[in-house]
Amino acid sequence: MSYSVIRTGKFNDQLTDIIMYIKDVFSKKEALDYLNYLEEQINNLKKYPYIGAVPRYQAISKQGYRALICKQNIVFYKVNEQEKVIALHIIVPSKRNYINLI
């Protein structure tokens, strides 16, 4: 059974910031390529919702988050088994201290 994916406003805002950064620093093509790559990874969650790792910080993992590593960024999401929904909460650069962002 396939899951549906929803994106929080925070996730969308952060994704926009990342894509605009890539566009400004590299190129529009690089930004679109990364966006396409990210969409593929997110679509994989529909069939395989648990492919993301359990976060190493207990404060995050105890809340039910999973972490999907997408090149230099991490997508934090939760799986709702009852409703078959995956909620994308935030996307952050992997080098950033993200523990206070969730």
Image (cartoon, rainbow, N blue to C red):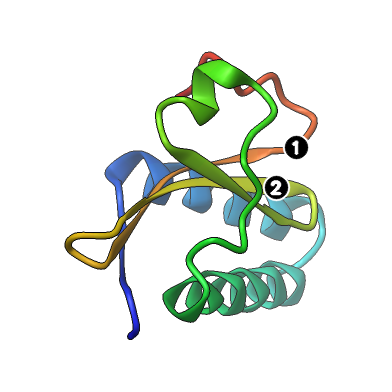
SS for tag 1? loop
Q: Where is residue 3 in the image (x, y as percent from the top left)?
A: 32, 75
**Residue in view at x 79 percent, y 49 percent:** 72
**Above or below: residue 45 compared with residue 92:** below
Task: Residue 73: give its label.
Answer: 2
**Residue in view at x 52 percent, y 74 percent:** 48
- Which image quadrant is residue 46 in? bottom left
How would you rate the neighbour count of disc 1 (Cα within 10 Å): few for under 14, some for 14-19, many for 20 or more?
some
- Who is closer to the viewer here, 95 or 5? 5
- Who is closer to the viewer here, 41 or 54? 54
Q: Which of marks 2 and 1 is nearer the N terminus?
A: 2
Residue receiving disc 1? 94
SS for tag 2? strand
Task: Residue 32: give its label.
Answer: none
Residue 93 falls left or right of residue 12 = right
Residue 93 falls left or right of residue 80 = right
Q: Do the residues labelled 2 and 1 touch (CB within 8 Å)?
A: yes
Q: Where is residue 93 in the image (x, y as percent from the top left)?
A: 70, 38
